[in-house]
Image (cartoon, rainbow, N blue to C red):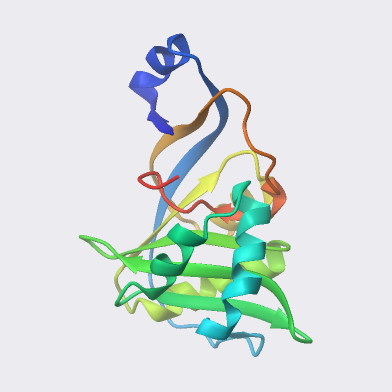
Amino acid sequence: MDGVVAMQSFYEKGGFNIAFRDIRYEKMGRPFLPDSNISSINVKDFQSILEYDTLCFGFSRPQVLLPWLKIPDNKTFKYTEQGKLKGFVVVRKVHKGYKICPLFADNIIIAEELYKACLNSVGAEPLYIDIPEINKEAIELVEKYNMNYIYECARMYFGKAPKMEMKKIFGITSFELG
């Protein structure tokens, strides 16, 4: 779960433990030249996207991921080098603007290129991202693009947190979905 600040102590009393803070930021979209390694995700990519997602999320979730990638008006991008997936991002339309959910990448360079593809894809509308505070490179990305702080939650688990590649998580899937 993602607990709002005011409720975290209540959830802790119920047995949930804080794994890390998630912080939401906003930036207005703007044009960038796309990196040649970035393209749209297609059906043939699903298995490699699922494997990458599993590394970052902590367990396999094909029943969530496949429909998520197919939501109308979602924008999906992958970053590949020599045929190998190095990261991906999903952007979905929200009430006001768009939301990145998730942005998973091998490193900050790839994450930045995917982030620029997102900024490029939303026109001049707001773009939101929820970063895990424990990924210091995600914080560097936020600072580099002067993103505006909106609010925060804490990722909390009942029992032990799943094993995740935190250094690859630049944007969580969503406060609303985990």
Observer able to see residue 40: no
- The residue that appears at 44% across and 62% down in the rendered structure is 100
- The residue that appears at 59% across and 50% down in the rendered structure is 57
Quarter of the rendering occupied by the C terminus: top left
In this picture, is 21 found above or below 122? above
- The residue that appears at 38% across and 13% down in the rendered structure is 10
In this picture, is 38 found above or below 10? below
- 112 horizontally vs 122: left or right: right
Front residue (pair 120, 77):
77
Observer able to see residue 70: yes
In this picture, is 153 found above or below 106? above
Front residue (pair 101, 23):
101
- 27 horizontally vs 155: left or right: left
Query: Residue extending furthest top?
Result: 13
- The residue that appears at 66% across and 64% down in the rendered structure is 51
Disc tally is 0
Query: Residue extending furthest left?
Result: 95
Quarter of the rendering occupied by the N terminus: top left
Front residue (pair 72, 61):
61
Picture coordinates of residue 161 (x, y %)?
A: 62, 32
Query: Residue extending furthest right?
Result: 82
Picture coordinates of residue 69 (x, y %)?
A: 43, 71
Picture coordinates of residue 159 (x, y %)?
A: 58, 22
